[in-house]
Image (cartoon, helix red, strand yellow):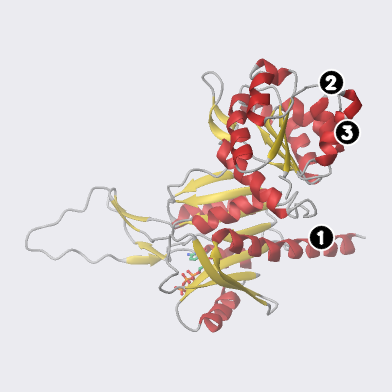
Amino acid sequence: MDKPKVVLGVSGGIAAYKACELLRRLTESGHDVRVVPTGAALHFVGAATWSALSGNPVSTEVWSDVHEVPHVRIGQHADLVVVAPATADMLAKAAHGLADDLLTNTLLTARCPVVFAPAMHTEMWEHPATQENVATLRRRGAVVIEPAVGRLTGVDTGKGRLPDPDEIFEICRRVLARGAAAEPDLAGRHVVVSAGGTREPLDPVRYLGNRSSGKQGYALARIAAARGARVTLIEANTGMPDPAGVDVVHVGTAVQLREAVLKAAADADAVVMAAAVADFRPATYAEGKIKKKDGQEPAPIVLVRNPDVLAEISAERARPEQVIVGFAAETDDVLANGREKLRRKGCDLLVVNEVGERKTFGSEENEAVVLAADGAETPVPYGPKEALAETVWDLVAPRLRASDTTDSDTSG
Ligand code: CTP
């Protein structure tokens, strides 16, 4: 079988050196990579490096090998185009269809999925011109990864770093796996995913917590990004690095998680509550460490109920057409308990995990049944958490499209 053909576009930012690592990951995993840098990119990394690492010729403009019509052919034959780093200038050109070099011509002729990994200073990323260009590209179906937050060139810190090359590689792999025909069916959508487990503090050194690893929530966030969504991940105590291409909000307790979810859900198309939220918290918090006293039994811990975030956002939807997904872990009467919980929580879909011997918190795999409010049941066999994440979005995406139709029906 032919190797998948990937075009790696590199535009002129200091993060171009990180694209060398992405190139290595792509070639070592069996992809035929053609690097198309811009002229400015060559100020940062030279053509010899791109050519040696890819094993393919490298040029920046349309005037080399004209008999092969490279400005059309490279884009037409690609299975994936990934632009990393994508500068503000490159995003602007791509959004407006300018074609003044080989990379911008390639973007116009490509009919395969396109991924942009932007990198720039925070001010440039936040500028309304850039944000509108990003929105345009996403609306057309391109996957634009959110930049990472951290150290930028010089002394600045903020949003605008190129995500880790491994993370960009993972997104490329998933986009390629979905195939050319697969629409990025969450393009233009904002989705919110909660992940991990809340911790309810007792005193400065102790808390009540749970064993949720957050892996299922991270898989949901990553897959949604690869399917084109803008993703906000509300993360509670996972200890995992932020996944590329998503906005991450870090929280600790159930109350903080509620606040972050309500804020992010205000303009969200879908909310998936994969976090294990503590149902109770200690009634009081001791400002100092609770000390043991000789000859005395410890005082009992009094608990109070936490808000039920899933039930609350389902009952008071920020937008009537919002799709809300909950998770539930059950040991017995899985389907009957799941149905009852779906009704009680008022969400649209409930992913019911059967908790058993093999199926523990923290594992890489999962098995579930997704129950829908309309009565449908979708079993998901034992397998990677990514597969379950794909199924969840497979069920969410048509519900979003259905609500689009309803909207246009009512407005027309
Ligand atoms: N959830 C929530 N707020 C809470 C508790 C749970 O939003 N205070 C959400 C979780 O994120 C998950 C679902 O509700 O999506 C799980 O509901 P829960 O009733 O806690 O289910 P189980 O833990 O399976 O619990 P139980 O059998 O104790 O009812």
- Residue furthest out toward the front: 1
- Residue furthest out toward the left: 295
Is residue 66 shown above or below 283?
above
- The residue that disc 3 covers is 72
Compute the Cα span from label 2 to label 3.
Answer: 13 Å
User: Callout 1, which amino acid?
Assistant: Asp
- The residue that disc 1 covers is 404
List x then y, in percent, for residue 398: 76, 64
Residue 242 visible, this orientation: yes
Q: Quadrant of residue 300?
A: bottom left
Nearer the observer, 346 or 371: 371
Mark 2 residue element: loop
Pointer 1 or 3: first along the chain:
3
Is residue 121 shown above or below 182?
above
Question: Quadrant where the C terminus lies?
Answer: bottom right
- The residue that disc 2 covers is 64
| Residue under the point 78% across and 53% down | 183
From the viewer's perspective, is the residue at label 2 or at label 3 nearer?
2
Q: Is mark 3 within 8 Å of ligand 1?
A: no
**Within 10 Å of the Cα at label 1, are there few (<14), some (14-19), or many (20+) other Cα atoms?**
few
Compute the Cα span from label 2 to label 1.
Answer: 46 Å
List x then y, in percent, for residue 50: 66, 25
Nearer the observer, 270 or 72: 72
Compute the Cα span from label 1 to label 3.
Answer: 35 Å
List x then y, in percent, for residue 294: 7, 59
User: Callout 2, which amino acid?
Assistant: Ser
User: Callout 3, which amino acid?
Assistant: Val
| Residue under the point 65% across and 64% down | 391
